[in-house]
């Protein structure tokens, strides 16, 4: 490129000497033309440079809210642009962002993970968030019904607006489309669990290699559904992409076979009606009950574990048939005295570790200690806690990013007697 520019500059000099006897206007026209040629060469260099992969960042980076778009009742999409104006890396379809949210009234920012809800865009990320409202148990039928409102999700839906600044971790997560396989893809989405499926569908459309894909998307009705036009555009434009919309509580204006296909929920029975066999890859995302039911059904359908992919944030977990408690931990420890105790210093509590738990976070929750947690997958760092004594181990192959002298509760298991600052 540089050689070409130098040659053109050399030609410019030679032409300038021959033009000295001509009128000035002709000279100016020649110089303008040459300037345009040089600019085209430089633009080509910039374009080639922009194709080089953009490196990710470590820790948090400040982003500015570029826009907040209402998608449906209690659901908004948030567009985030880096404050420094520098490039942002692409991401694998299905990954998520970790946000540090300055929720009013909270002593510390609240950390939450939200799936990226679009294919990679040039200079912004998009996440789509539903304001979570959970009814609390009632002691009697006459007691007024009370609700728990998700602090982070309600803050995003009710208070966030363009111009706000928030801290963001780079895209992460292992819930990604397996592009090495040619097996059909089955996407199972419940409610706001549709968000990562959009980026997966867009990726399948982009590659357009003929790989079959089926989306089963379950919501209450059309008022709760998001990205309907996007899904329709993708499936209309790609013969091998298909979508089935399931409404459990259709409105009077919802007409079957017009704006939805199945009255009911996404279920294994429905899946078996749609598929000739289980020789597919299955991707799950949705509320905890939805995830647990579908996962259990797939296992009973004898789908191999390596063909089941799922995303679960917060306290959602799937694939377990029993809940551990301190009592069961103690019972198991009594039978296996080699299991070492775990001390929670601030809580002044020591309990035996049990193989019945998958992580220190589960042991803490079973002991009625509820530390802050986010992704429960080692990505967000919310559950990072000081390790005061002893050592921990992590699942083989897990890349753990935490400060020296700390551990990630959601992944860590004790390696002998330990004490943690919790």
Image (cartoon, rainbow, N blue to C red):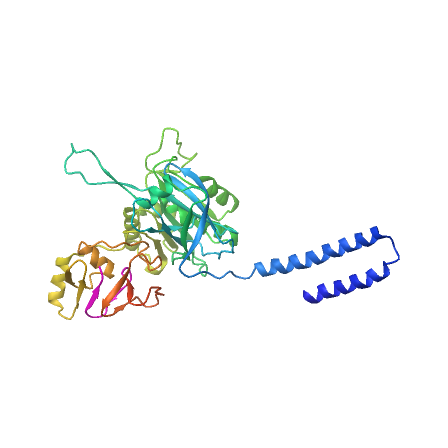
Please give left or right for residue 259 compared with residue 323 in the image: right
Assign the N terminus to one quadrant of the image: bottom right
Expressed as whole percent of the image width and height from the top left, the position of residue 49 reads 59, 61
**Would residue 386 appear left or right of 175 to someone viewing this image?**
left
* Residue at image point 34% right, 37% down: 220
Report if residue 414 lies within the magenta region: yes
Magenta span: helix, strand or loop, mainly? loop
Task: Give 101 or 306, whichever is nearer the viewer.
Answer: 101
Q: Quadrant of residue 71?
A: top left
Q: Is residue 401 magenta?
A: no
Expressed as whole percent of the image width and height from the top left, the position of residue 142 reads: 15, 32
- Farthest residue to the right: give it: 21
Q: Is residue 309 above or below residue 160?
A: below
Q: Position of residue 193 (x, y in %)?
A: 36, 47
List the single residue furthest toward the top.
252
Residue range (magenta): 409-422
Q: Position of residue 307 (x, y in %)?
A: 36, 58
Q: Is 200 drawn above or below residue 134 in the view shown?
A: below
Quadrant containing the C terminus is bottom left
Q: Is residue 322 visible?
A: no
- Residue drawn at point x = 13 percent, y = 68 percent: 336
Horizontal side of 38 relative to 190 (left or right) equals right
Question: Closest to the observer: 208 or 139?
Answer: 139
Residue at position x 30%, y 49% in the image:
291
Residue 249 visible, this orientation: yes
User: Which residue sits at x=72%, y=65%?
Assistant: 6
């Amino acid at each position: 490129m540089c050689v070409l520019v130098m040659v053109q500059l050399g030609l410019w000099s030679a032409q300038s000497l021959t033009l000295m006897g001509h009128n000035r206007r002709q000279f100016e026209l020649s110089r303008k033309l040459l300037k345009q040629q040089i600019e085209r060469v430089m633009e080509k260099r910039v374009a080639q440079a922009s194709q080089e992969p953009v490196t990710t960042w470590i820790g948090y980076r400040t982003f500015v809210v570029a826009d907040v778009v209402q998608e449906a009742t209690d659901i908004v999409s948030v567009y985030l642009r880096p404050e420094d104006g520098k490039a942002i890396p692409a991401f694998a379809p299905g990954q998520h962002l970790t946000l540090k949210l300055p929720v009013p009234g909270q002593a510390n920012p609240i950390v939450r993970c939200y799936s990226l809800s679009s294919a990679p865009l040039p200079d912004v990320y998009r996440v789509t968030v539903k304001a979570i409202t959970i009814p609390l148990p009632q002691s009697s039928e006459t007691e007024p019904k009370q609700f728990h409102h998700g602090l982070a999700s309600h803050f995003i839906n009710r208070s966030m607006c363009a111009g706000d600044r928030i801290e963001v971790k780079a895209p992460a997560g292992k819930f990604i489309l397996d592009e090495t396989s040619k097996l059909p893809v089955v996407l199972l989405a419940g409610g706001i669990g549709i968000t990562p499926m959009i980026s997966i569908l867009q990726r399948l459309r982009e590659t357009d290699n003929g790989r079959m894909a089926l989306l089963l998307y379950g919501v209450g009705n059309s008022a709760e559904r998001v990205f309907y036009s996007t899904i329709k555009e993708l499936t209309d434009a790609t013969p091998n992409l298909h979508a089935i919309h399931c409404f459990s509580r259709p409105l009077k204006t919802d007409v079957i076979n017009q704006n939805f296909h199945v009255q009911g929920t996404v279920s294994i029975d429905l899946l078996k009606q749609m598929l000739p066999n289980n020789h597919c890859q299955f991707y799950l995302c949705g509320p905890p009950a939805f995830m647990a039911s579908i996962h259990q059904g797939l296992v009973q359908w004898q789908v191999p574990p390596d063909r089941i992919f799922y995303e679960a944030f917060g306290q959602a977990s799937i694939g377990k048939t029993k809940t551990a408690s301190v009592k069961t931990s103690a019972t198991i420890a009594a039978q296996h005295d080699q299991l070492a105790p775990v001390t929670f210093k601030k809580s002044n509590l020591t309990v035996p570790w049990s193989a019945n738990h998958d992580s220190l976070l589960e042991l803490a929750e079973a002991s009625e200690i509820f530390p802050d947690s986010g992704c429960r997958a080692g990505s967000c760092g919310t559950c990072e806690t000081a390790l005061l004594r002893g050592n921990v181990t992590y699942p083989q192959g897990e890349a753990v990013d935490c400060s020296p002298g700390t551990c990630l509760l959601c992944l860590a298991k004790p390696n002998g007697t330990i004490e943690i600052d919790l």
